[in-house]
Amino acid sequence: MSPPTLVVLAVPDCPNAPLLIERLREISTDRTEFEPIQRIVHDQAEAERYGMHGSPTLLVNGVDPFAQPGTPASLSCRLYPHPCGRVDGAPSVAELAAVLRPHESGAESCPTTPISDPAISTPPGAPPSPTTGSAPTSPPPS
């Protein structure tokens, strides 16, 4: 079976497009298996034509596997929520593997690459992560 056609759609100078491409390469057996075509999207009409739901967007055989139903086309910065409550500028390696290699998925789905903006690395109201605050402690045994 041949690898899927992958396209990364991004606005010019999107800071998260390289992160998405690197994560795709991490799950490639030979660093080229999941090498995407990169397409720069310049305006809303192009975003609508290509199916971009924020930058960056990954299309797998023409479909955005991470888009929620009804999500409109957009040139905005895209953040990807992860099961652990964190958001990031690209799907995690495990989330990409689940889409591209569903028979091999099951690894941790939270990204290990830190994002630089702490305002978006921890959602409002979420407890601090062990790297940005103190970890919760359990009460001493009675």
Image (tube, helix red, strand yellow):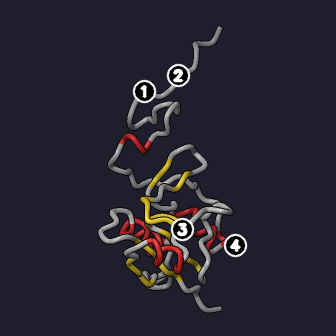
Between discs 2 and 3, the one toward the N terminus: 3
* Amino acid identity at mark 2: Thr
Front label number (2 vs 3) = 3
Residue that carries the numbered disc 3 in the rendered image: 73
Q: Using the rendered view, name the quadrant where residue 44 is placed.
A: bottom left
Between discs 4 and 1, the one toward the N terminus: 4
Residue that carries the numbered disc 1 in the rendered image: 134
* Amino acid identity at mark 1: Ser
Locate the N terminus by quadrant.
bottom right
Q: Residue at x 46, y 82 (%)?
A: 36
The disc label shown at residue 103, or none: 4
Distance in Å between CA atoms under marks 2 and 4: 37 Å
Residue that carries the numbered disc 2 in the rendered image: 137
Front label number (4 vs 3) = 3
Between discs 2 and 4, the one toward the N terminus: 4
* Amino acid identity at mark 3: Ala
Distance in Å between CA atoms under marks 1 and 3: 39 Å
* Residue 134 in the image, given as x and y percentages of width and height: 42, 27
Instruction: Answer few, some or many: residues within 10 Å of disc 2's Cα (few below 14, many 20 plus, some between 14 and 19).
Output: few
Front one among 55 and 7: 55
Instruction: Answer few, some or many: residues within 10 Å of disc 3's Cα (few below 14, many 20 plus, some between 14 and 19).
Output: some
Looking at the image, residue 83 sits to the left or right of residue 129; the answer is: right
Instruction: Answer few, some or many: residues within 10 Å of disc 1's Cα (few below 14, many 20 plus, some between 14 and 19).
Output: few
Proximity of marks 1 and 2: CB atoms separated by less than 8 Å: yes
Circle 4 SS class: helix
Circle 1 SS class: loop
Proximity of marks 1 and 3: CB atoms separated by less than 8 Å: no
Front one among 4 and 11: 11
Q: Using the rendered view, name the quadrant where residue 71 is placed.
A: bottom right
* Residue 79 in the image, given as x and y percentages of width and height: 48, 55
